[in-house]
Image: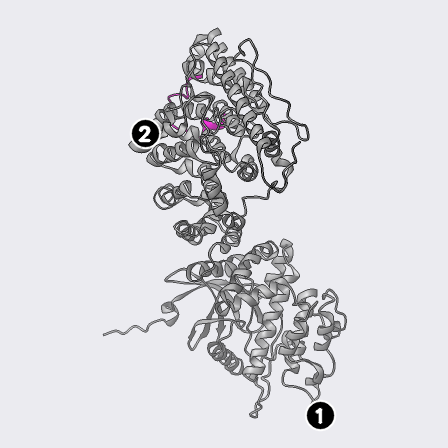
Amino acid sequence: MWFFARDPVRDFPFELIPEPLEGGPPGPWALHRGRKKATGSTVSIFVYDVKPGAEDQTQVAKAAFKRLKTLRHPNILAYIDGLETEKCLHVVTEAVTPLGMYLKARVEAGDLKELEISWGLHQIVKALSFLVNDCSLIHNNVCMASVFVDRAGEWKLGGLDYMYSAQGNGEGPPRKGIPELEQYDPPELADSSGRVVKEKWSADMWRLGCLIWEVFNGPLPRAAALRNPGKIPKSLVPHYCELVGANPKVRPNPARFLQNCRAPGGFMSNRFVETNLFLEEIQIKEPTEKQKFFQELSKSLDSFPEDFCRHKVLPQLLTAFEFGSAGAVVLTPLFKVGKFLNAEEYQQKIIPVVVKMFSSTDRAMRIRLLQQMEQFIQYLDEPTVNTQIFPHVVHGFLDTNPAIREQTVKSMLLLAPKLNEANLNVELMKHFARLQAKDDQGPIRCNTTVCLGKIGSYLSASTRHRVLTSAFSRATKDPFAPSRVAGVLGFAATHNLYSMNDCAHKILPVLCSLTVDPEKSVRDQAFKAIRSFLSKLESVSEDPTQLAEVEKDVHAASSPGMGGAAASWAGWAVTGVSSLTSKLIRAHPTATPAETNVPQRPMPEGLPAPAPTPVPAIPTTSGHWETQEEDKDTAEDNSAADRWDDEDWGSLEEAESVLAQQEDWSAGGQAGHAGQVSSRDHKSPESDWSSWEAEGSWDQGWQEQSSPERPPEGQAKAELARKKREERRREMEAKRAEKKAAKGPMKLGARKLD
């Protein structure tokens, strides 16, 4: 029977990449890249080949193997596994790069900053402090070759080959026998008399000074070069000089050196070091401290190294959301760090957190997610959007907070291309119909119209035919002037989606009625749109063969390319209306569709309102759009409302201020203009939508206002206008009479009447 000896190297769970890394540690150790066979995760493997006649060197290597295996500290190279045979030693550690190679690559890329050097030196000094103060060990090999850098940019102390105890025990420092390492020995080692007074850390602190010199100036040519600090920063020079002083007694303890460098104005007193120290202790911090830290973190991330953000900040952000109570404050830094990830990493690390966040009931988190959707929408697939995100987002349409409703509407621009047939053509249109007809905020109704025009090309042909014309027609009757402009621009941006018959019989009559709108901005856009539609009709009239080409998109399936015409209508994108919306929500908090549909023209500021105009003897023509004058108080109120962009109204984009004002908004939208009726259509949109709410038909909701009622003749309309003016005049006269007849003490601020 034959027995085959097992090869321990072949059975080793880690695979070695044969080519050693350049810039590895001097001496018998060779540094290789490696990976774990089971998972493919990268590691570093230090290999020592046992050679005949090198017993002393082999004993040193085995001692280093043992030391690294037993020493555990965040700033010391992390041991993972090892293999010891008669022919070799394999030491597996976390994946690292020699410091010399790392600094060279960073300098060539132009990315090396003093911030990361300050933190790297902080880590090495902290490791020395642990060894000498806590373990009573002398490292005895501090130099560039014994320092390594992991993937997060963290510096790790290795090279434990020549370590010995600081407590004596009859053991002296091991003999190195490598000239490249002996040049870092302090000058007192050459004195064999033993009369030199020194501390146990003196030799290692000298070598730390050599490391600092090499980090800033390159390889140390000779010990005499230490006298010239070279490129060492001025804030570090005084402390460096203490390290390389001739008197070993005055060299500071590693802990004292850290304290000196962390003093105000010191080399290690900066935001990057403070951030790292906080992250190291984040598990024991108070929730309020964590909240403040994450709020301020986003401002600093731009100046931090990319690898640090990806591999150290990101895991802490994910942990803070998953197991902590950080909430919405982690979103801004999370998406900022997400920019450093590739598509695969983003899918694995960020998207699961985002999907979970959308189910949160925290309003601050919801509004921030909606505001920053543009940063992650490209990584969301359609099934995730339709089943896990959209069902939560649509709750925002019904929220009592206007800012959340506004952001929900605007987010549909990004979600629409990924929505399925039912969500886009049924569910979303139902919510848009309700918002456009019943929302008490004019700017939100405006943004709903704008968004519908932008996503019109994604709708199915049947939905476009039922919805677009009636929706934009409804918008042109809105009492809020920007909504009427949005309705006109909606027609223009989707002009390729209408048949020639619809253009002539449905759209142009609506646009023509706006040529006498009280607002000049509405009239200007109406004339522009009319010219566009007339041009199309005229071209088809001249050459009927063009009809098929002009109407090719009318019955076509939904396509994102069909919405390109919207870009030519400058200033109509939802993002361009956001600041307008934020200001107008406060300027017109109660502008509902139930208000008078023809707004009154405000009087110029500072001028008194003229007396009511007598009713003319002849009927007023239907083309006359001048509004009749009101009393002075009404004119001043209207003038103040018209001057919204002269004021600093703040912004609804800040979630905190929005949520603080929630009750004011929700209450203000319920009271303002009850009892007013529409004068353009002679019926209230509220009544139009009552049947839709009862039957659940979104189609009926859009179609209610598709064709405006027209009086049988112009005389009837003029007569109605005359009666309203007369009724208004009588009301004003009655109010003035009541004021004159009032008795009793005068009210504060009232003007004394003669």
The quarter in which the N terminus is drawn is: bottom left
Task: Where is residue 545? Give x, y as percent.
Answer: 43, 9
What is the CA distance from the residue labelled 2 to the residue labelled 1?
104 Å
- Badge 2: residue crowd in 10 Å (few <14, some 14–19, many ≥20): some
Coordinates of residue 346 in the picture (x, y in percent): 45, 50
Farthest residue in the right direction?
Answer: 228
* Residue 125 x/y as whole percent: 61, 74
Does residue 411 appear anywhere in the picture?
Answer: no
Frontmost residue, 293 versus 739:
739
Magenta residues span 550-565
The residue that disc 1 covers is 195
Of all residues, the one furthest to the top in this rendering is: 542
**Viewer-side label of 2, 1:** 2
- Of the pair 124 and 226, the residue shown nearer to us: 124
Identify the secondary structure beneath mark 2: helix
On screen, residue 270 above or below 402: below
